[in-house]
Amino acid sequence: MKKENRSSQKNSGEMKSTLTLDRRDFLKNLGGGIIILFSATEFPLLHGMAMPSEQAQPDLNAYLRIGEDGRVSCFTGKIEMGQGVITSLAQELADELDVSIDSIVMIMGDTDLCPFDQGTWGSMTTRFFGPQLRAAGAEARTILMELASESLKVPVSRLEVKDGVVYDTKKPEKKVTYVELTKGQKIVKTLSEKPFVKNPSEHKVIGKPVFRRDSLEKVTGKAKYAADIQLPGMLYARILRPPAHEAKMKSLDVSGAEKIEGVTVVREGDLVAVLHENPDIADDALSQIRAEFDSVPSQPNHETIFEYLVNSGTEADIISEGGNLEEGRKISEVILENQYNDGYKAHAAIELHAATATMEGERIIIWASTQTPFGIRSEVAEAMNMPEKDIRIMQIFIGGGFGGKAAGRQVVEAARLTKLTGKPVQVAWTRREVFFYDTFRPAAVVKITSGITNSGKVTLWDYKVYFAGSRGSQHFFDVANHKTESLDSGSKPTHPFATGPWRAPANNTNTWARESQIDMMAFKAGIDPLEFRLNNIKDERMLRVLKAAAEKFGWTPSKTPSGRGYGIACGADAGTYVALMAEAKVDKNTGSVQVVRVVCAQEMGLVINPQGAIIQAEGCIVMGLGYALTEDVHFEGGKVLTRNFDSYDFTKFSWTPEIEVVLVDAKDSPPQGGGEPAIICAGGVVANAIFDATGARVYQLPMTPERILEAMKVTEK
């Protein structure tokens, strides 16, 4: 895209770009102001260093507008689901523009107002969108400084800005505000160059702890979520569900529901629903439906799934390879072969999957709990055989996603029902429905054969991960003879229900298995587990976080099991390096575990909002205790047996340990992700703390009291 001449833009408001006609018309109607458009294919320079790139986008992914009222609006397809980007993105823009953060308005995820974005996941917002936003802010500031120079008849070199006021450094009383400069202007520019953004020494807002901008709304209950939307004449929908995945309906009798006054019964293809203005009456109507489904052929269950996965893993992808495994085996003085099994995990977000939809003429307007507004719009358009322009996904808070709100089945259901009934419709899944239809973190198996010398040098690493994925499978220690493979079944369906990303997908399983194996190698070598890692790692970033965690924790060397209940685990995710150290107490009579203290050290480049980064790390650790100790989905083929929190146990307040977070200084490096890294080490650090306390190694997640007691019996033998 080419930058237009500013004078011609003032007159016409036109621009040449790859924007669609609809969006160009929208920009024309924005009114006065300065608009900077930018895409994921344009990257600024940070202290002269090119930023990493996300997958190329064919169109703009965001823009900012400085309005005549002085407000600075950022329009982006990214969404806020508790990760705090509504605050950190505003910090970045405020710093580059030299305005108050209170003047920043974030417009997020509205498909009518915001340009296309693939979705919010993978801790990519700060890494990839943040630099773009800063560059756009720098570009806008440059334009404003040029306008101020013209207005004040002063060279740009003599001008400075504070809180949106440009002044002459030699005559401070000579000044002009951004508001004054913006009025009467109609400037639209495409970010086609790579402006330099500020150095860390120049930051006034970036790097400073900022209280979350949405906190007051959320703690007072003012924040609106998809199920909070109330529309005149709205119907609550309840939908008939099969007893198991792949079960087909044989017969249906809705006469009982039809007899209830005010109930609307809808049947279209696979969709059978009852609707009423009162949700309780809709529940009663659903209970009156009589349906018969065929039985589903027997498939693996939660106990046999691991053998099934290993047998199904026929397609191998080599992630890394070096040296010769046979040579590594020959020179190894100790060989360890272990298999690590990890069961299915639910996202278990407190907010249920919900969508509220209504018709406006020929258009469908939807408020949806989704991480992917534009993807959901496409999904609805395809299901409804409608053009995407006739579907609008509205901005709304999301009550936690963790990867589970990328799919949009409930959104499609709400859209179908509002069009069929002609009335506003809300579809809010029950907890049982969420457990049935939510995508699960896939069950997986990791097989590791490793070798060491008697002095503790790693000489062999043969790593195979089945069905988790390769993220986090890469080792970071110095070993000449190694091979890492990721295995699955190719295009052949394997899991009895839908699986998908779960906060740091694959990395939780891989890091737990790897860090458990490393601790066992340290045990066999008779070396302190921290010392063993330091002796076998050359990566400077990993060494820094390990040493930072050890200093904060007060780690003192000891062979394991020492009886102290100390654990250690480290890894990398979303460009961030992380190390956890923990102290845990294990009741040897019951097998119950209480993690009493966790120290987390993260090196994540330039930290935009230290308070937000610490909150995310704490959340990762608390959530990670659940998958480590209790979270497990039980099933029999396509029939999900775990359907609510009475049988799916996750972290409680009473489990929460003392948590200390150390952010390792690296402000001269590009910012990295912070929403997921700390969780990857939770399983490994708890497993290693249990081993240090009891000498028992648990090879299956979750590490329940029963499995710990069983492992202790094996150790005693």
Image (spheres, helix red, strand yellow):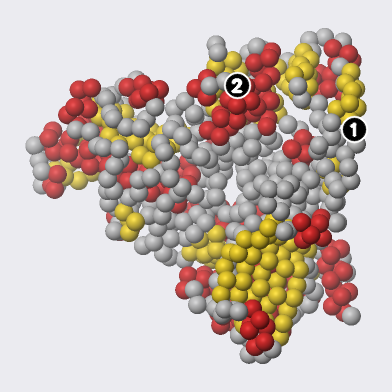
The picture places residue 84, in percent across and down from the top left corner, at 51, 45
Where residue 549 sits, quadrant-wise, is bottom right
- Residues at marks 1 and 2, CA–CA distance in whole angstroms: 30 Å
- The disc at residue 529 is none
Asked whether residue 715 is in view, the answer is: yes
Quarter holding the N terminus is top left
- Under tag 1, what secondary structure? loop
In the rendered image of this protein, does residue 507 appear above or below residue 418? below
Q: Position of residue 698 (x, y in %)?
A: 78, 68
Label whose residue precedes the other's in the sequence (1 or 2): 1
Amino acid at the residue labelled 1: Asp
Which of the 4 image quarters holds residue 714? Answer: bottom right
Q: Which residue is mark 2?
A: 385
Q: Residue furthest left?
A: 153
**Viewer-closest of 534 and 521:** 521
Q: Residue at x 71, y 77 (%)?
A: 520
Say which residue appears at 48% left-offset and 38% top-offset.
117
| Residue depicted at x 75% and y 49% | 494
Amino acid type at circle 2 is Asn
Q: Which residue is mark 1?
A: 294
Query: Residue placed at 78% from the left, 10% from the top?
Result: 262
* CB atoms of marks 1 and 2 within 8 Å: no
Disc 2, SS:
loop
Residue 715 vs 512, above or below: the answer is below
Q: Nearer the viewer, residue 2 or 151?
A: 2
Q: Residue 490: image x %, image y %?
A: 68, 52
Residue 396 visible at all: no
Q: Residues within 10 Å of mark 2 (few under 14, many from 20)?
A: few
For this view, does 627 lie left or right of residue 157? right
Quarter holding the C terminus is bottom right
